[in-house]
Image (tube, grey):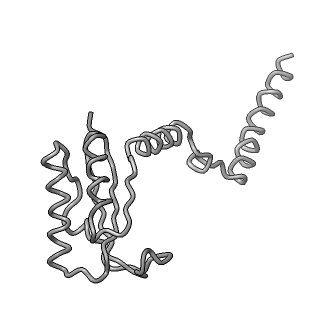
Amino acid sequence: MNRSYEIMFIVRPDVEEAELETLIDTFSGYITDGGGTVKNSRADQKMGRRRLAYTVGKYNDGFYVLLIVDAPAALIAEIERRLRVSENVIKFITVRMDEEDKRVAKIKAHRDAHVKRSALPQVNAEAAAAAPAEEAPAVEAEAEAVTAEA
């Protein structure tokens, strides 16, 4: 069963652009060869060079790469192993997104089931006050007609 994952890894800042491209191609190839699919495009994968929150090894910044993947769990374990032994990758994290997608869908369904009070039609206070006043003369006329018959 394929599940949805986000794999983010940080590549050393001294890596050339061409080397970064081959690294991304390599990991994308591992995923497709293992029976998974990479869902995001090439432009969405590279997030650019950014400053790290804390020093990792001797590096203060790195190239961030995000892969959105549909793959079996065994393949993700193998990808993580290969990320761990890669010299160019200084940090990585894998997050399973299908549970998050379920949670978001549940919240959205709950919100759609309940009607917002702001979405209900509002009754204007002046119009509500004027409506009974218009009905009052008609009621008084009927009351006079009933008393006149008696």
Residue 116 picture quarter: top right
The spot of residue 55 in percent (x, y) is: 47, 78
Give the vertical position of 67 relative to 55 (above or below). above
- The quadrant of the rendering that contains the N terminus is top left
Q: 131 or 40: which is nearer to us? A: 40
Q: Residue at x 30, y 53 (%)?
A: 81
Give the vertical position of 143 relative to 117 (above or below). above
Residue 60 picture quarter: bottom left
Q: Residue at x 15, y 49 (%)?
A: 32
Q: 60 or 67: which is nearer to us? A: 60
Q: 145 or 34: which is nearer to us? A: 34
Give the vertical position of 9 relative to 29 (above or below). below
In the image, taking residue 27 as reference, residue 77 lies left or right, namely right
Give the vertical position of 135 relative to 44 (above or below). above
Q: 69 or 85: which is nearer to us? A: 85
- The quadrant of the rendering that contains the C terminus is top right
The spot of residue 142 in percent (x, y) is: 77, 27
Q: Residue at x 43, y 41 (%)?
A: 99
The spot of residue 124 in percent (x, y) is: 67, 52
Count of number-bearing discs: 0
In the image, taking residue 127 as reference, residue 112 lies left or right, namely left
In the image, taking residue 70 as reference, residue 93 lies left or right, namely right
